[in-house]
Image (spheres, rainbow, N blue to C red):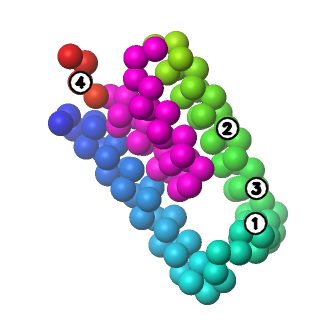
Amino acid sequence: MSGLRIVYLILVVAGIVMPFRYFIPWFQVNGLDLGLLLEAWHANGATSGIVWDLTVSAAALIVWMIAEVYQRKDYWVLLLCIPAIFCIGVSCGLPLYLFLRSRPVV
């Protein structure tokens, strides 16, 4: 595995671990109340700004992934990165996509 793919893989792991370091304790205290989670995301202007920044980034990333996979017509498994974006975040979905996309061409 190339050095670049190792870096992507490390970023995938970091993109899973870092958000869940905060989400898991929050869910332990508040349960799976998604309404309360959305309320917490918009607790102030700073958090609302970050939420919208990540939402627009996620939308752009998803459009790019779909367009690239459709244009290349060769590696539909890359679309599995979309659930990673929705379930974990851009911090996991983007490096996962780059990791899978940078596979050796045979």
Dot placed on the residue nearer the N-terminal end, 1 or 2: 1
Residue contact at pointers 2 and 3, CB within 8 angstroms: no
User: Residues under labels 4 and 2: Cα distance?
Assistant: 28 Å
Label for residue 93? none
Disc 2 element: helix
Label for residue 59? 2
Disc 1 element: helix
User: Residues under labels 4 and 3: Cα distance?
Assistant: 38 Å
Q: Which residues are magenta?
A: 73-102
Residue 11 position (above or below residue 31):
above
Residue contact at pointers 4 and 2, CB within 8 angstroms: no
Q: Is residue 31 left or right of residue 1?
A: right
Residue 88 locus on image (x, y percent): 53, 56
User: What amino acid does circle 2 point to?
Assistant: Ala
Q: Residue at x 63, y 28 (%)?
A: 63
Dot placed on the residue nearer the N-terminal end, 1 or 4: 1
| The stretch drawn in magenta includes residue 90 | yes
Label for residue 38? 1
Residue 87: name its quadrant: bottom right
Residue 104 locus on image (x, y percent): 23, 24
Where does the C terminus fall, quadrant-wise?
top left
